[in-house]
Image (spheres, coloured by chain):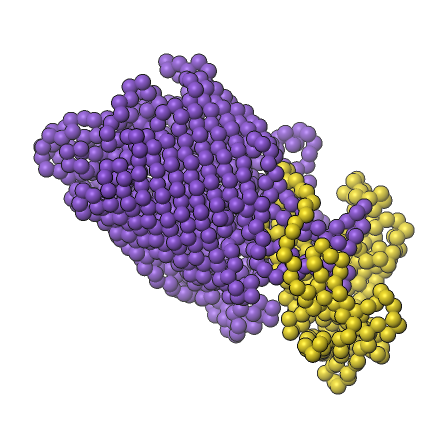
Chain colours: A purple, B yellow
């Protein structure tokens, strides 16, 4: 299935046979297959944002029907409201899954006017944010490291640019983006709480096109086009910020900048084969006063081959390489150093989809990952430095998964998807492994044995089964009930003891003293559409049990600690909640409103005196609204409002004297809640002289972030009170807040 | 250096161009008072102190002094030193207990503290580690401060030279004085010898001095347990509330029984230099 204008393969198009009351949906490569008795059929193709099509076919032989759908935005005046169009909210088998509406995303207001995918994710029901200035999010009681973020199947370890003000996803090149919060199919694994599967566009197969944008923060350009019409195409885009250039001109020694590049090519090698190659490269650099510098970046590359064995068996083979690294540098004659850290991942994914009968669709395959962890290396960079070089040993691991699942249409009303994923994880050599007398004694560390392992020697193996099940029962053509259960296993752990992971937190593999984390989640939901699917509503409840949650001892030393195993404290966590949402997807006025109530607690040995405490990301209420209004061909407006309960924080409950210091007394972890966070943003898009014949189309986006200038608390810390640089002997609390009201303008050009 | 890493992390997280700060009043439930024991035994030949107090409310002004505790220090060769509360009766020394006789802590001596408060016993034991003498101190002008001084004339840095024994595992705590007054910031300068090289080769002072001031340095030797306590204390006083840095927690102490505070047992090296350009 392809977009009529650009030739892009469309994902998730519903192909429906009204007479049979059944159909299929296109997969992530725009491919679908269905086996039916030979007859004449009326087939409906529908997809949100596109005009549905109904065609007649005579089915007497195997036929291959490639079709093109046209974007709804262009054919607005011809919309005929069809009875069963665009009802995937109700009829789809997916529960606990949110798809980002890209048309909506481009109109949403944002900081600096750059539409941001992660900001859209942070507004979904069941998703909690840490606050602004971060690209982290927490899904259904899961911490920020429990989310897998994929770009064309390659993992992105830190999705933030500029400390999270914007994310690494350039909205211009995103084709489809789905967040799985629960009911996760067995083809996915590796993290406990969510999968964000982002697919980029392949590139216009029909003609050369492009888009350029100039904004207050950054500029971007995107070019796409065919190699040979309808056979192959390419896409390349780049973004760069220029705050650093302004600062240099102003004589300021500070500097902050980012860039990113997306590139992709694809070819049809014949009617049965397609290959794709895609890459993402991005980097951030920050320097303070010419003395301190900090940089980080992701780089990913994927090579994919789609093969059709026959009309029923589809295969996807992908090779992936990915690297995340960061560096920190202090320039000083005596104290200067450079600190670097890397995580590299090489993997192969083989996935078969077998459309056995119209009722049975099997999905099975293998995913193998080889990872190299380089947790940290410090070298002095000063001639007369007083420090010696330190390097933590490199670690390696193999992560295998086999998966099998069946999408089973049992009756007209009942469909199930059931399957299993088998996870086999091995930490392998070369490595030096320590055994400790008491692995939890982090003050007097006593090593009882040191074992050396050679390259590829298995050190520790963990095998876990992950059953998956989801089901949908159609109550009628307007409403359904869905249910899911899944077990997820996470074999790698982010070593981060704050609420928000810093770009320089490190990943470690499961090992002798660190077990894989496991989560079991059940979810049940009621889905209802109104007014011919113009309104889509749902209510969903979930409960999640987590074990071996990786947390840390109080005062844990997590940087450059060869014996970090003594700081691990794994324990239990549990979360439950209720989410409700209502969306309006058609008409001049569109938008959504959603509300989430959730609670998440942890019980970790040795932390908080062994008593349960609220997790750092426990925010009881979250409420989001988006409204978008198309006034005319020229003007459209949108506004977003978000509210959430403040995050828990550990604050002092007393103070005392020690030598000449006045330390705070801590008696309870996360006993206090910060004030609630709320904010409204607005934006207006002006598209002057919209003329379909002209090849160049311009638009202006005017945005205001934090319209009523609320001082949203970022964090609170305590300090000694000083008057005229002299301590008074009393203590005080200080609140930090980030963005005041921020207006911005962006100019866009499509050609 | 791990210390400077932590400060950097705090800086990076917070010092983004858009961060703003505001002092606020918070109404938080306060915990009932807890016992704090703060003691030092050093290699100086003097009457050593132990201070016993209780915690106060966050917005309060110092906690209650405990004046009726029974305090004793003993060592591994049979010496027992009794301490008396505020023997001279000065108001400012309420809560302070001093040893009845002068004694000098012995290098490698093992000292044990016992404090009895209302029949509850608190106990600590630690060793006095050897301390390396300061070879010399030199003065140098910090060019960045000369260009942009924080305070008028405060541009001189003191460089410290001392040997560091490589065969033993050692930990150090540095205190800097300006005209005999302890530098008032909350930074705690502790180092472990894994990071330091074989000589402290011109370790620069973290604070700057003015011409005419007397700059003095004290180096204390620490055991691993005391080093951990002071590192935790520094993190507690310089944290950002748990946003990027770990959530605040009480420091891990060598005192058992549930009291806060530290029983410090250290050798001391001293040096001083008059700032004359």
Q: Quadrant of residue A467?
A: bottom left
The image shows residue A367 at horizontal and vertical percentages of 33, 51
The image shows residue B86 at horizontal and vertical percentages of 84, 72
Tell me if residue A229 comes above or below residue A648 in the rendering: above
Q: Please tell me which residue lies in front, A245 or A31.
A: A31
Residue A110 visible from this viewpoint:
yes
Q: Please tell me which residue lies in front, A366 or A516.
A: A516
Residue at 72% over, 69% down: B37
Residue at 46% over, 19% down: A635
The image shows residue A389 at horizontal and vertical percentages of 62, 57
Q: Quadrant of residue A454?
A: bottom left
Residue B200 visible from this viewpoint:
no
Tell me if residue A732 comes above or below residue B48 in the rendering: above
Residue at 42% over, 58% down: A546
Quadrant location of the N terminus of chain B?
Answer: bottom right
In the image: residue A661, left or right of residue A737: right
Outermost residue toward the bottom in this view? B78
Tell me if residue A697 comes above or below residue A536 in the rendering: above
Q: Quadrant of residue A520?
A: bottom left
Q: Please tell me which residue lies in front, B195 or A108.
A: A108
Q: Please tell me which residue lies in front, A604 or A548.
A: A604
The image shows residue B41 at horizontal and vertical percentages of 77, 73
Q: Count up the numbered dots.
A: 0
In the image: residue A198, left or right of residue A639: left
Residue at 24% over, 42% down: A475
In the image: residue A246, left or right of residue A363: right
């Amino acid at each position: 299935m392809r977009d009529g204008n650009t030739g892009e393969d469309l994902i998730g198009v519903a192909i429906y046979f009204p007479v049979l009351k059944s159909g299929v949906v296109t997969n992530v490569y725009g491919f679908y297959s269905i086996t039916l008795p030979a007859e004449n059929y009326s087939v409906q193709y529908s997809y949100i944002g596109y005009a549905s099509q109904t065609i007649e076919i005579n089915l007497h032989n195997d036929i291959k029907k490639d079709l093109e759908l046209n974007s709804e935005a262009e054919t607005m005046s011809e919309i005929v409201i069809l009875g069963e169009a665009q009802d995937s909210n109700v009829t789809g088998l997916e529960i606990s899954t949110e798809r980002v509406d890209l048309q909506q995303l481009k109109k949403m207001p944002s900081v600096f006017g750059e539409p941001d995918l992660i900001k859209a994710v942070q507004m979904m029901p069941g998703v909690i944010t840490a606050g602004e200035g971060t690209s982290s999010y927490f899904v259904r009681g899961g911490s920020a490291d429990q989310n897998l973020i994929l770009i064309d199947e390659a993992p992105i370890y830190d999705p933030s640019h500029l400390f999270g003000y914007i994310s690494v996803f350039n909205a211009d090149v995103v084709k489809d983006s789905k967040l799985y919060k629960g009911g996760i199919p067995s083809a996915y694994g590796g993290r406990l709480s969510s999968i964000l599967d982002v697919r980029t566009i392949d590139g216009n197969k029909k003609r050369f096109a492009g888009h350029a944008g100039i904004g207050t923060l950054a500029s971007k350009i995107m070019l796409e086009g065919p190699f040979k019409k309808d056979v192959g195409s390419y896409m390349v885009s780049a973004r760069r910020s220029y705050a650093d250039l302004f600062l240099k001109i102003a004589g300021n020694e500070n500097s902050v900048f980012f860039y990113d590049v997306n590139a992709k090519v694809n070819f049809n090698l014949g009617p049965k084969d397609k290959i794709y190659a895609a890459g993402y490269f991005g980097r951030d650099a920050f320097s303070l006063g010419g003395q301190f510098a900090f940089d980080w970046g992701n780089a990913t590359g994927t090579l994919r081959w789609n093969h059709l064995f026959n009309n029923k068996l589809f295969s996807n083979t992908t090779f992936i390489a990915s690297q995340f690294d960061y560096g920190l540098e202090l320039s000083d004659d005596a104290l200067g150093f450079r600190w670097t850290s890397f995580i590299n991942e090489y993997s192969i994914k083989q996935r078969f989809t077998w459309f056995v009968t119209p009722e049975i669709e099997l999905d099975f395959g293998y995913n193998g990952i080889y990872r190299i962890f380089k947790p940290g290396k410090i070298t002095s960079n000063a001639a007369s430095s007083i420090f010696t070089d330190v390097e933590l040993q490199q670690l390696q691991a193999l992560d295998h998964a086999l998966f099998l699942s069946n999408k089973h249409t049992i009756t007209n009303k009942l469909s199930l998807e059931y399957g299993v994923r088998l996870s086999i994880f091995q930490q392998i050599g070369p490595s030096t492994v320590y055994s400790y007398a008491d692995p939890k004694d982090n003050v007097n560390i006593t090593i009882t044995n040191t074992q050396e392992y050679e390259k590829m020697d298995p050190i520790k193996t963990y095998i876990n089964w992950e059953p998956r099940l989801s089901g949908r029962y159609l109550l009628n053509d307007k409403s359904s009930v869905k249910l899911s259960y899944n077990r997820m296993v996470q074999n790698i752990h982010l070593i981060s003891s704050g609420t928000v992971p810093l770009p320089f937190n490190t990943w470690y593999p499961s090992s002798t003293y660190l077990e894989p984390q496991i989560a079991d989640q059940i979810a049940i939901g009621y889905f209802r559409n109104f007014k011919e699917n113009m309104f889509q509503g749902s209510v969903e409840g979930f409960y999640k049990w987590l074990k071996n949650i990786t947390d840390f001892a109080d005062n844990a030393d997590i940087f450059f600690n060869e014996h970090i195993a003594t700081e691990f404290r794994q324990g239990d966590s549990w979360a439950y909640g209720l989410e409700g949402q209502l969306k309006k997807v058609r008409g001049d006025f569109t938008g959504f409103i959603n509300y989430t109530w959730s609670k998440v607690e942890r019980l970790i040995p040795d932390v908080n005196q062994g008593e349960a405490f609220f997790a750092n990301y426990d925010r009881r209420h979250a409420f989001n609204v988006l409204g978008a209004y198309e006034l005319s061909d020229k003007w459209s407006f949108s506004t977003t409002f978000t509210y959430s309960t403040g995050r828990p924080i550990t604050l002092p409950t007393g103070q005392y004297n020690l030598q000449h210091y006045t330390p705070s007394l801590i008696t309870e972890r996360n006993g206090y809640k910060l004030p609630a966070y709320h904010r409204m943003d607005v934006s207006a898009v002006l598209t002057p002289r919209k003329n379909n014949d002209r090849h160049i189309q311009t638009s202006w986006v005017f945005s205001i972030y934090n319209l009523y200038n609320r001082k949203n608390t970022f964090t609170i810390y305590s300090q000694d009170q000083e008057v005229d640089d002299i301590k008074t002997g009393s203590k005080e609390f200080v609140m930090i807040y980030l963005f005041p009201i921020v207006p911005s303008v962006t100019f866009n050009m499509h050609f | 250096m791990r210390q400077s890493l932590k400060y950097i992390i705090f800086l990076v997280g917070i010092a983004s161009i858009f961060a703003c700060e505001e002092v606020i009043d918070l109404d938080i439930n306060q915990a009932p008072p807890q016992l704090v024991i703060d003691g030092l035994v050093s290699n100086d030949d003097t009457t050593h102190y132990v201070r016993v107090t209780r915690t106060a409310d966050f917005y309060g002004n110092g906690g209650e002094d405990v004046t009726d505790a029974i305090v004793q220090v003993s060592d591994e060769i049979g010496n027992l030193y009794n301490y008396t509360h505020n023997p001279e009766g000065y108001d400012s020394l309420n809560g302070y207990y001093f040893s009845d006789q002068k004694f000098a802590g012995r290098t490698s001596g093992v000292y044990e503290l016992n404090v009895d408060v209302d029949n509850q016993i608190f106990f600590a034991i630690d060793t006095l580690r050897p301390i390396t003498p300061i070879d010399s101190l030199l003065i140098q002008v910090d060019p960045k401060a000369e260009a942009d001084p924080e305070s008028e004339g405060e541009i001189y840095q003191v460089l410290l030279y001392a040997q560091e024994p490589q065969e033993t595992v050692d930990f150090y705590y540095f205190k800097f004085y300006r005209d005999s007054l302890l530098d008032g910031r909350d930074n705690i300068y502790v180092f472990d010898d894994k990071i330091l090289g074989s000589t402290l080769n011109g370790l620069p002072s973290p604070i700057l001095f003015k011409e005419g001031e007397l700059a003095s340095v004290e180096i204390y030797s620490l055991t691993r347990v005391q080093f951990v306590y002071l590192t935790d204390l520094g993190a507690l006083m310089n944290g950002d509330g748990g946003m990027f840095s770990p959530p605040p927690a009480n420091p891990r102490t060598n005192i058992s029984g549930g009291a806060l505070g530290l029983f410090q047992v250290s050798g001391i090296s001293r040096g001083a230099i008059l700032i004359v350009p």
